[in-house]
Image: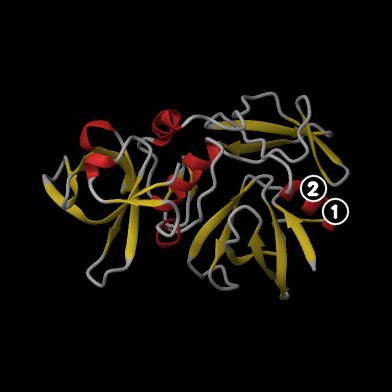
Amino acid sequence: MLFGICNLSIVAIRIEPSNKSEMTSQLLFGEHFKVLEKRKQWIKIRVSFDHYEGWIDFKQYEEISEEDYLLLSNSDYELTGELIDFITDENENFYSVPIGSNLPFYNTKSLRINTTSFFYEGKIMPQKLEKVFLIEVAYKYLNSPFLSGGKTPFGIDCSGFTQMVYKLCGYSLLRDANQQASQGEALSFIEESEPGDLAFFDNEEGVITHVGIIMKDNYIIHSYGKVRIDRIDHSGIFNIDTLKHTHKLRVIKKII
């Protein structure tokens, strides 16, 4: 078994080993993974954090030892807290990194990938924040454009948004909306929910395709065209611009 780590700002994860294939997720700097399969120009990976699988370009990662993989998997995540910041390596090369990037083996402004040392002087997110801070973190992504498979303020999808908000607060969510819907405790009514709970929405076939974070006073923040705030009621999401319902409510889940 081989192991790897993302040593670039953002790397696309695709369904198939082709640049023409759909991007289903992204790796951010410092995320590590198992290598499941190797082809001439692609590798299939399983991300350690959420066990998500897909293909990445073989030129866009660095191999690490099994020892480092296990050490990273069994240690707390240190995450960058600025919307965009910079990491420098020992040769003073700059790497721009988005919020929520991992800092492997971080210790007093220094980190490492294999034998290469890096330096980061920006904000570090606390290991764990109380639930009330989820909405405050969610606001950091407000007006970020929707991007299928995206996980950054420069483009993010609905489940990437909820996953990153929870991750920045110290909690783990799976990657896709239908996967996240399997987590937590189901609530019977909106009135039972509190800010930070997740609301899930399905399509005409009953498949869960959308998720957002409930706010107070029957508002919801979610990624739909952009990260935006709309109303939520027993029917679903009511778009405050078009004055129409856009998503049909399926279930509300209390994750924490």
Furthest-right residue in view? 115
**Image quadrant containing the N terminus:** bottom right
Q: Are marks 1 and 2 in contact (CB under 8 Å)?
A: yes
Rendered image quadrant of residue 117:
top right
On the rendered structure, is 176 left or right of 95? left
Q: CA distance from mark 1 to mark 2?
A: 6 Å
Q: Which residue is mark 1?
A: 67
In the rendered image, which residue does mark 2 sit on?
71
Residue drawn at (88%, 44%), measured in percent from left and top?
115
Vertical order, 86 against 115 (above or below)? above
Percent across and percent down for residue 109 are: 75, 26
In which image quadrant can residue 91 be found?
top right
Judge left or right: residue 67 versus residue 88.
Answer: right
Residue drawn at x 57%, y 30% is 81
- Foreground of the two, 125 or 154: 125
Residue appearing at x 78%, y 29% in the figure: 107
Query: Within 10 Å of the Cα at label 2, are there few (<14), some (14-19), or many (20+) other Cα atoms?
Result: few
Residue lying at 34% horizontally and 47% vertically, measured from the top left: 212
